[in-house]
Image (spheres, rainbow, N blue to C red):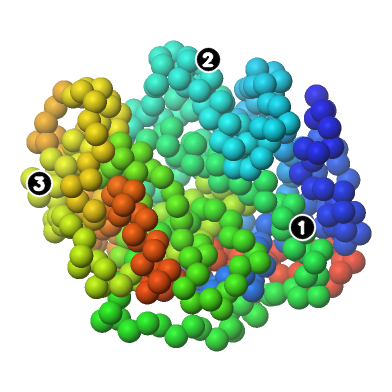
């Protein structure tokens, strides 16, 4: 099935012609286009630093060419996101006719395109035997759940990689599926913007060597700031002013209604441990190898942090277990204990990250089901330590964080995996990356 009009093509006409002339875009076949991987790497000058210090930077596969849907508004896009071909076409036949022209603005288009598929596949038993089914703990049938939804083998394998089992168990199967599909759709949707950048800035091709040799920006005084990290899975505006110290470019706005401290409310999660951020970035990269992933390194003014109502759990103690058990259950079963308003007693909660290894948040158990082993561990300086999260809770806290970062804080954005180098125009472009297993 062809798309209804040219306005839904992945590349607009001017960008398409430009890329074809430079052998970065190849002839379309059966509604799929073939592109050079150079288009998957955002421009170097738009980022504060390259990121060779992160292992996630090297989780990049060597590929000569990449197949992407020729039309964004198409069943092929559902395949690109991770559905198998049969499910993608069933979704398209059901959802496709319902999208009007005005529904195709970003990000509303992405949200509608993805969530309508999720609602069909999971919420209304379109493919699953039970509504709202999910896989949560280690003993659940994650593969069976994904097969029932219609997820293709490649995405199943990526989510189930054994080396990231600990990270996977910090959220549910549905969460990782939606997060991965959003990453992939975002990467596809931004291809035209990257092609447009190539068109405008073709005289300024940045290599990985150029990126790595840039003069680092001076660090703020450590005694005045607290350094936090967050994996940002959204592409960054390539026209951002990289010299503006207070610009919030790259700081994520990810509304999570899951996790240890959310209890159904809006929460932004950060970590003071670069190793923890790196682990999550690695998992994001292997799930969506074409996505533009960054790690935002923010320096939060200590004088502002001192004003917040803060709750800190030093270790996986009884109080931490009660908080995790309560919030996890409310995320999954919001009506179990009645309608509970968002918990905004604390503006900031600090504590270990939990992994749901062998306890069920929706079971009628108790905090005794949560053990010390359920705290996520990361290796720091050769030792296993608890992974720590900082949760800024409630709209007031989140707004104040952004205001204070813009006024008194500091942000550095690290591009993950952007080690692509272009060869002279007119030649085939190869990706020069190395992979650390």
Instruction: Describe residue 383's horizontal placement relative to residue 428 as left or right.
Output: left
Using the image, determine if residue 412 lies above or below residue 285. Answer: below
Q: Quadrant of the N terminus?
A: top right
Looking at the image, tell me whether mark 1 or mark 2 is earlier in sequence order.
Answer: 2
In-front residue for pair 112/207:
112
In terms of image quadrants, where is residue 332? top left
Q: What is the secondary structure assignment of the residue under circle 1? A: helix
Give the number of callouts. Answer: 3
Q: Residue at x 84, y 32 (%)?
A: 5
Residue that badge 2 annotates: 126
Q: Is residue 329 visible?
A: no
For the residues marked 3 and 1, what is the alpha-carbon distance in whole angstroms?
51 Å
> Which circle, 1 or 2, is nearer the viewer?
1
Looking at the image, tell me whether mark 3 or mark 2 is earlier in sequence order.
Answer: 2
Pointer 3 and pointer 1: residues touching (CB < 8 Å)?
no
Q: Residue at x 46, y 61 (%)?
A: 251
For the residues marked 3 and 2, what is the alpha-carbon distance in whole angstroms?
40 Å
Q: Which mark is residue 319?
A: 3
In terms of image quadrants, where is residue 370? top left
Q: Which mark is residue 195?
A: 1
Using the image, determine if residue 321 lies above or below residue 427. Answer: above
Looking at the image, tell me whether mark 3 or mark 1 is earlier in sequence order.
Answer: 1
Q: What is the secondary structure assignment of the residue under circle 2? A: loop
In-front residue for pair 5/308:
308
Q: Is residue 102 visible?
A: yes
In terms of image quadrants, where is residue 423? bottom right
Residue 211 pos. (x, y %): 61, 77
Residue 188 pos. (x, y %): 67, 46
Instruction: Describe residue 225's horizontal placement relative to residue 242 as left or right.
Output: left
């Amino acid at each position: 099935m062809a798309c209804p009009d040219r306005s839904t093509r992945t590349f607009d006409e001017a960008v398409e012609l430009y890329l074809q002339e430079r052998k970065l875009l190849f002839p379309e076949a059966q509604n799929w286009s073939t592109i050079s991987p150079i288009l998957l790497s955002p421009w170097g000058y738009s980022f504060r630093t390259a990121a060779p210090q992160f292992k996630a930077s090297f989780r990049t596969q060597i590929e000569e060419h990449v197949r992407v849907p020729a039309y964004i508004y198409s069943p092929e896009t559902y395949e690109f996101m991770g559905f198998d071909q049969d499910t993608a076409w069933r979704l398209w036949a059901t959802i496709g006719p319902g999208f009007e022209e005005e529904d195709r603005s970003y990000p509303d288009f992405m949200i509608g395109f993805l969530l309508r598929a999720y609602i069909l596949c999971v919420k209304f038993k379109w493919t699953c035997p039970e509504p709202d089914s999910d896989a949560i703990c280690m003993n659940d049938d994650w593969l069976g759940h994904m097969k029932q939804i219609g997820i293709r083998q490649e995405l199943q394998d990526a989510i189930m990689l054994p080396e990231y089992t600990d990270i996977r168990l910090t959220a549910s199967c549905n969460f990782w599926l939606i997060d991965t599909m959003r990453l992939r759709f975002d990467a596809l949707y931004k291809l035209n913007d990257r092609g447009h950048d190539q068109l405008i800035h073709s005289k300024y091709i940045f290599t990985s060597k150029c990126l790595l040799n840039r003069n680092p920006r001076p660090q703020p005084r450590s005694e005045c700031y607290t350094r936090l990290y967050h994996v940002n899975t959204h592409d960054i505006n390539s026209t951002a002013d990289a010299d503006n110290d207070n610009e919030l470019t790259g700081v994520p706005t990810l509304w999570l209604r899951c996790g240890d401290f959310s209890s159904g409310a809006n929460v932004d999660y950060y970590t003071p441990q670069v190793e923890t951020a790196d682990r999550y970035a690695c998992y994001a990269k292997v799930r969506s190898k074409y996505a533009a992933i960054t790690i935002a390194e923010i320096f939060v003014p200590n004088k502002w942090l001192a004003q917040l109502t803060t709750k800190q759990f030093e270790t996986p103690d009884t109080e931490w277990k009660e908080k995790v058990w309560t919030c996890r259950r409310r995320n999954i079963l919001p009506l179990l204990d009645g309608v509970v308003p968002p918990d905004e007693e604390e503006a900031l909660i600090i504590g270990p990250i939990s992994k749901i290894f062998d306890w069920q948040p929706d079971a009628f158990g108790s905090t005794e089901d949560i053990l010390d082993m359920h705290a996520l561990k990361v290796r720091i300086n050769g030792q296993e330590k608890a992974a720590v999260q900082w949760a800024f809770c409630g709209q007031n806290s989140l707004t104040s964080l952004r205001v204070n970062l813009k006024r008194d804080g500091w942000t550095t954005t690290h591009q993950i995996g952007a080690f692509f180098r272009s060869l002279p125009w007119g030649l085939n472009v190869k990706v020069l990356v190395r992979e650390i297993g």
